[in-house]
């Protein structure tokens, strides 16, 4: 039974998941900038060298092998087009190793933007050069060029030592990925401790400040790796010192509880020692020491008894903030009074994530209206630093992918993923920071989050506890349309098709009138027959294409029907291929979110709906190395025939451009499956053309497909919906 169902039945407390972002401390930022400088030096000394540029060129322009060469024609070969030949070699390289070729392309544009090959790289596929791109190319260059060349032994050692600072260990046996110190710096940044203080300030300004009972959970008492970390070692001890020193949070009478520590503020030590002594019925003494905190020493009490006693202090409101480790405060710890979780751990597994959130969801007899707030904290590299690290955002996405919650934008929907923790404006601000957009700031993400935050009382109302609810779970693929990225070129095609249709009609009428006017020159039966035939052909053409134009206009007003038809074609194609059972007609629905965003929702059993959603996502993604492409941009014309094909050809010349969708891998294993999918597309959407990528023509089509923008929503293309 998923947590939302239990909440709606009133057996768990309603809740909100939220995220707070921070930036590295100055000392940590200096450590990261040293790595940025080291990487820049690596690029200048290795990849910007003549040998490095030559390596990039060879990755993008591989030599043609006998298998790549097209069959010889008896006719003499035409004069070769150098640019076409370069594009063909680039497409072959992408087909052989898409990831490496793409990385080589973006690195080339970064180190040599004026290079002739840079103009061949479409921006939709070859975007910004990331740290991962640079490291990928550097490691492959070192393995294939430097290691095998005795004369380059010195450069090999230089690159090997430098890459070790990024967690890559190059050996004569290959590449091994180790702990990245930049990732460690972000994961255990001291800024996360201050973020925990800021979150508590926010909670104590809210509508339920008097009821706040908070727990801050860390991975360790002290983290052993100090590289790049500022001040004291990361862990529960460090965050407690901040909590105890802050003027606001010290009023919560915080306590630190770990396997080896029981620590409180010096001012609170006598009173809390007396309380614990009463609860445990054993001696509790204060260990005097300099500083603002004191350790409490318990004479005879097991760890479980001490945890229970501290939980009782939280229930009584004597202690309102607890700091501890995941090992002690994870599964098995029962304290219903806790209603605020601040997660400073690196856990992202399904079990670990849900166990931690479960600490705050128990009903509290002392607060019937309890609402829980569960916070995650992530540290991001600022947009002004070129170095990238996606470790924090990947962890966030994995963690929240295991959780259900009310959408931050629409409280009527229960969703998984970051969308239930961040509103769409905050997600956009997050993507801007990750994409290194000028002027993007981490503070803007938090501002947008707080601007759209709900009070605890409103969250309880939003959950609609006790109202009827549905239990269906659905996979969602999110589509974001734009004028340059639409599935059908409906508007331009109509602009050309309408005058052509009526032009043919006018020509037919004129021909009929001429024929009728020629009755004097021909016998009456012959002239009348010609005129009637011409007028009949004109009327049938007008009716035939008028209906196509009307259908296209209806689709233009309701683009959701196009995406629903596409998903239905995928599902039916998978059924025909024997991959899934036949789906109910209501299993696929499309919902619009504004004018440009559409959610394709797929119901059914978990394996089947995931298979369909994965295939739909692949269909609308940018093409990488598909076996088949489906041309769909002329779908306003249904059926085929000599006249239809002629008009379609004329429209195609009048409106340049293509929309070529990659046929999903699940439908490309056999040609019969791909042809069956194309047939299903014609039934559900309209005209299409299936192309198997072979020879020169296939490479040309693939180049067009790869230069076409993706239709997927950029930040959260996949999610789940419940209810």
Image (spheres, rainbow, N blue to C red):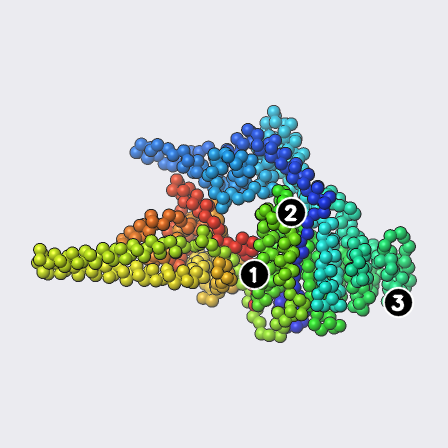
State which mark lies toward you, 1 or 2.
2
Residue extending furthest top? 151
Which residue is tagged 3? Answer: 278
Which residue is tagged 2? Answer: 382
Question: In the image, 217: left or right of 261?
Answer: left
Residue at coordinates 75% horizontally, 64% vertically from top-left? Answer: 213
How far apart marks 3 and 1 lie (CA) works out to 49 Å
State which mark lies toward you, 2 or 3.
2
The part of the image, by quadrant, that contains residue 398 is bottom right
Residue 690: x %, y % from top left = 38, 50
Q: Nearer the viewer, residue 678 or 699?
A: 699
Q: Report the quarter where the N terminus lies.
A: bottom right
Residue 24: x %, y % from top left = 70, 47
Q: Nearer the viewer, residue 243 or 207?
A: 207
Compared to residue 228, the image places residue 501 above or below, namely below
The part of the image, by quadrant, that contains residue 295 is bottom right
Q: What SS does tag 2 mark?
A: loop
Residue extending furthest front? 439
Q: Report the quarter where the C terminus lies.
A: bottom right
> From this viewpoint, is residue 587 visible?
yes
Local crowd at mark 2 within 10 Å, few (<14), some, or many (≥20)? some
- Callout count: 3
Which residue is tagged 1? Answer: 720
Disc 2 or 3, which lies upstream in sequence?
A: 3
Q: What SS does tag 3 mark?
A: helix
Q: What SS does tag 1 mark?
A: strand
């Amino acid at each position: 039974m998923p947590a939302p169902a239990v909440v709606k039945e009133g057996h768990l407390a309603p809740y909100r998941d939220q995220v707070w972002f921070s930036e590295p401390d100055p000392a940590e930022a200096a450590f990261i900038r040293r790595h940025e400088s080291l990487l820049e030096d690596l690029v200048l000394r290795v990849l910007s060298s003549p040998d490095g540029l030559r390596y990039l060129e060879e990755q993008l322009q591989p030599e043609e092998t006998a298998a790549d060469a097209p069959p010889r024609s008896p006719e003499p070969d035409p004069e070769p087009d150098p640019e076409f030949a370069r594009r063909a070699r680039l497409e072959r390289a992408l087909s052989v190793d898409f990831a490496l070729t793409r990385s080589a392309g973006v690195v080339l544009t970064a180190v040599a933007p004026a290079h002739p090959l840079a103009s061949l790289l479409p921006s939709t596929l070859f975007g910004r050069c990331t740290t991962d791109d640079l490291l990928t190319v550097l490691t492959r260059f070192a393995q294939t060029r430097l290691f095998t060349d005795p004369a380059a032994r010195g450069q090999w050692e230089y690159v090997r030592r430098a890459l070790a600072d990024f967690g890559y260990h190059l050996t004569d046996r290959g590449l091994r990925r180790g702990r990245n110190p930049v990732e460690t710096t972000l994961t255990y940044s001291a800024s996360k401790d201050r973020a925990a203080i800021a979150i508590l300030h926010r909670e104590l300004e809210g509508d339920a400040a008097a009821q706040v009972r908070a727990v801050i959970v860390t991975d360790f008492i002290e983290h052993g790796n100090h590289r790049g970390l500022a001040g004291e070692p990361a862990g529960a001890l460090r965050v407690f010192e901040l909590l105890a020193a802050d003027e606001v949070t010290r009023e919560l009478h915080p306590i630190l509880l770990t396997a080896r520590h029981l620590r409180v503020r010096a001012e609170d030590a006598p009173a809390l020692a007396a309380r614990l002594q009463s609860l445990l019925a054993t001696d509790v003494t204060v260990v005097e020491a300099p500083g603002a905190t004191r350790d409490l020493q318990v004479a005879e009490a097991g760890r479980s008894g001490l945890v229970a006693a501290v939980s009782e202090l939280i229930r009584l409101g004597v202690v309102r903030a607890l700091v501890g480790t995941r090992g002690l405060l994870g599964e098995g710890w029962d304290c219903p009074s806790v209603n605020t979780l601040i997660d400073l751990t690196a856990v992202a597994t399904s079990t670990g994530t849900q166990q931690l959130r479960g600490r705050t969801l128990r009903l509290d007899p002392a607060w019937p209206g309890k609402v829980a707030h569960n916070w995650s904290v992530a540290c991001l590299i600022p947009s002004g630093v070129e170095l990238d690290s996606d470790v924090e955002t990947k962890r966030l996405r994995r963690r929240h992918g295991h959780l259900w919650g009310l959408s931050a934008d629409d409280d009527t929907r229960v969703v998984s993923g970051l969308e239930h923790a961040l509103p769409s404006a905050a997600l956009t601000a997050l993507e801007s920071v990750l994409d290194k957009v000028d002027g993007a700031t981490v503070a803007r993400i938090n501002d947008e989050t707080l601007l759209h935050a709900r009070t605890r009382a409103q969250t309880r109302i939003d959950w609609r506890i006790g109202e009827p609810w549905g239990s269906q779970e659905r996979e969602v693929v999110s589509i974001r349309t734009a004028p340059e990225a639409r599935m059908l070129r409906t508007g331009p095609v109509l602009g050309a098709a309408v005058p052509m249709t009526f032009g043919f009609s006018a020509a037919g009428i004129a021909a009929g009138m001429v024929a009728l006017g020629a009755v004097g020159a021909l016998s009456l039966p012959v002239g009348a027959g010609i005129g009637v035939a011409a007028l009949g052909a004109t009327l049938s053409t007008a009716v035939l294409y008028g209906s196509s134009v009307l259908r296209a206009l209806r689709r233009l007003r309701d683009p959701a029907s196009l995406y629903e038809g596409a998903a239905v074609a995928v599902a039916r194609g998978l059924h025909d291929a024997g991959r899934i059972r036949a789906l109910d007609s209501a299993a696929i629905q499309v919902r619009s979110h504004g004018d440009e965003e559409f959610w394709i929702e797929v119901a059914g059993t978990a394996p089947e709906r995931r298979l369909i959603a994965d295939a739909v996502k692949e269909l609308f993604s940018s093409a990488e190395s598909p076996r088949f492409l489906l041309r769909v941009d002329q779908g306003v014309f249904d059926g085929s025939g000599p006249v239809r094909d002629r008009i379609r050809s004329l429209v195609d010349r009048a409106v340049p451009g293509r929309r070529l969708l990659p046929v999903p891998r699940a439908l490309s294993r056999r040609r019969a499956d791909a042809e069956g999918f194309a047939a299903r597309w014609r039934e559900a959407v309209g005209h299409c053309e299936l192309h198997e990528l072979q020879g020169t023509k296939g490479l040309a089509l693939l180049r067009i497909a790869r230069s076409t923008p993706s239709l997927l929503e950029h930040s959260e293309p996949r999610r789940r919906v419940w209810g």
